[in-house]
Image (tube, helix red, strand yellow):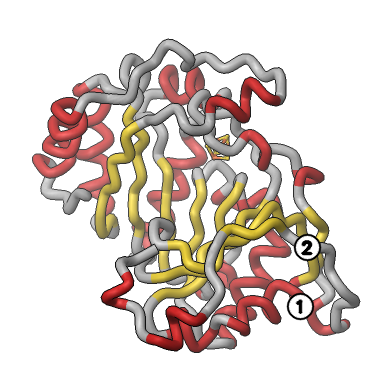
Amino acid sequence: MRPTDVIDVAAAAAPCGLRPATAPGPAPAAAATEGWVHSTETCGAVDGPGIRYVLFLSGCPLRCAYCHNPDTWHRHDGTLTSVADVLTDIGRYRGFIQARGGVTLSGGEPLTQPRFVKALLRGCKEMGLHTALDTSGYLGAKVDDEMMADLDLVLLDIKAFSEKTYRRLTGAELKPTLDFARRLAAIGKPIVLRYVLVPGWTDQPAEIESLAAFAARLGNVQRVDVLPFHQMGSHKWHDRGLRYRLDAVEPPSQELVDRTRELFRGAGLQVS
Ligand code: SF4
């Protein structure tokens, strides 16, 4: 979370942390739509602007080699939860996040549950909250116009910029993600582009330059976050008996991270 010097007393008193989803109580009929929730984080500081209530939904169609959360891949890894229950919990933090943050729907891949996401976004907007969607964009076609209207920001992970690298990394095709990015650009919906830098996988300068040029042309990319690969999720693969392909990969050097950020800056993008 943010340094304590930017948090007031009321905010500091609010409970924070990563919590597993709990079993739901009876849902009011008006918000009875249900979805699978892996966990929540009530004071997230890295998934969108300000302090966020972050809801991690379970289920993902991709299989990224560097995934930190393989425990979110299967929908039934989560807890079936009603929209009413989620919104009630978000409401507990409303005063706290309304002024200085908002709600981020993450995963897994939240768009594996579009009806749930749509109802949650609507409920958040009715509470006057800023909304963000953290997505690979692979299922961007599931976002209808009403959902789009209730979205303030898309945290878009473009994981690679050639079909070959993207498929090697994720097992899926790149095109749906780029189509979604172009659609967001056409309506001026803000994007924060996220790029995980993995030595030997996503560090080819020519590919990064092409992605940077694409992102700059979109015109709606507010910022690029270059995220250095790390090994903190590897134990989850081993614990589950999954074949982890990045055991021998070291995190990128600071020099490589800096060079990569410069490639995005060179295209005129703001970079963190
Ligand atoms: S899209 Fe996210 S949750 Fe899904 S496999 Fe990739 S890193 Fe993991």
Q: Position of residue 246 (x, y in %)?
A: 47, 17
**Location of mark 1 (residue):** 84
SS of the residue under disc 2: loop
Q: Residues within 10 Å of mark 1 (few under 14, many from 20)?
A: many
In the image, the residue with mark 2 has its CB under 8 Å from the nearest atom of ligand 1: no
- For the point 77% across and 60% down, the residue is 35
Q: Which mark is residue 22?
A: 2
Question: Quarter holding the N terminus?
Answer: bottom left
Task: Report the label total.
Answer: 2
- Residue 48 image-quadrant placement: bottom left
Q: From the viewer's perspective, is 230 left or right of 235?
A: left
Q: Position of residue 73 (x, y in %)?
A: 68, 38
Examine the rendering and report whether any part of residue 31 can be seen: yes
Q: Give the amino acid type for the residue marked by disc 1 in the picture.
A: Ala
Q: Is 122 placed above or below 45 here?
A: below
Q: Position of residue 257 (x, y in %)?
A: 20, 32
- For the point 30% across and 67% down, the residue is 3
Q: Residues within 10 Å of mark 2 (few under 14, many from 20)?
A: some
Q: Which mark is residue 252?
A: none
Examine the rendering and report whether any part of residue 148 can be seen: no
- For the point 55% across and 62% down, the residue is 17
Q: From the viewer's perspective, is 172 left or right of 161?
A: right
Name the mark nearer the viewer: 1 or 2: 2
- Residue 77 image-quadrant placement: top right
SS of the residue under disc 1: helix
Quadrant for ligand 1?
Answer: top right
Sequence-wise first label, 1 or 2: 2
Q: Give the amino acid type for the residue marked by disc 2 in the picture.
A: Thr
Q: Is 102 placed above or below 71 here?
A: below
Q: Disc 1 and disc 2: Cα gap in Å?
A: 13 Å
Q: Of 17 and 30, which appears nearest the observer?
A: 17
